[in-house]
Amino acid sequence: MSNTLDASGAGSDTPNLDFDGTTPYEDYVQADVLTHLQHLRSDDPGEMVFLVTTQVMELWFTVIVHEWETAAKAVREDRLPVAMDALKRSLRELEALNASWRPLAQLTPGQFNSYRSALGEGSGFQSAMYRRMEFLLGDKSASMLVPHRGAPRVHSELEKALHEPSLYDEVLRLLARRGLPVPSAVLDRDLSQRYEPSAEVEAVWTALYADPDAQSDLHRLGEVLTDVAELVWRWRNDHLVATRRAMGAKTGTGGSAGVAWLEKRATKNVFPELWTARSHV
């Protein structure tokens, strides 16, 4: 209940409306900054939807990276409840991220073409924060740092992330600390390289799923990671469908292969052994 007073000193239900400078809400949220970041480059009214939706996606990338980095650190420190909380939050955030495709999912080629030229060579694969998401999932490539050479801070952050353990690397190290036979070739691999599936890791997950009560917390961790992987797969497929609908098989912005590249991405599972192990349980 409000404790503010009206001019006569009596109690009032009206919130405080008089501030010396900006409002405390503005100071915290920086709403004025956010709502003035849209610099349109065409006269098409649909460009605002495209631009704002893309900016919202970038904000969700930022939150999800924060959650996965929190989870990775907690796993490294054997604080599994903290990691699980962060991963479960990220599920809700991934759902919101995926829903961001809805405003763009019905774009016709004509509508997209009306402002596509405004993107120039811009393309979503140039997103540094999305790249950090991919690195945390174990999908690493030094070549993806090249577009960011002109932005030293961003390049430095990506280079650091490239050489750090991914979320999945930390999970596999946890399994090894729990006495499970994760091979040294996996534990000691070059972390700057893309994670490749391992038959031995598949066998570890198979054993955990065959006897879920033996180390139930690891079984629950496997399931929440599978939830993450499924939502990442849905993100990639929704991206593919929206792009196919808006531009067909044409070359993508920024010179990418467009739909062909997205189709290839959509076939890849993150945390692969969590999926293949299910065939052996």
Image: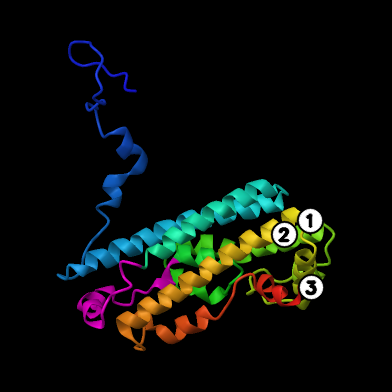
Q: Tell me which segment is drawn in magenta.
A: 102-127
Depicted 27 relative to depicted 241: above or below: above
**Closer to the N terminus: mark 3 or mark 1?**
3
Look at mark 2 in the image and give the residue it sits on: 219
When asked about the image quadrant of residue 18, the answer is: top left
Type of residue at label 3? Ala
Type of residue at label 1? Gln
**Closer to the N terminus: mark 2 or mark 3?**
3
Q: Position of residue 128 (x, y in %)?
A: 46, 65
Q: Residue at x 18, y 14 (%)?
A: 7
**Distance of label 3 from label 1 (alpha carbons):** 15 Å
Q: Residue at x 58, y 63 (%)?
A: 227
Under tag 2, what secondary structure?
A: helix
Look at mark 3 in the image and give the residue it sits on: 203
Look at mark 1 in the image and give the residue it sits on: 215
**Distance of label 2 from label 1 (alpha carbons):** 7 Å
Q: Which mark is residue 4?
A: none
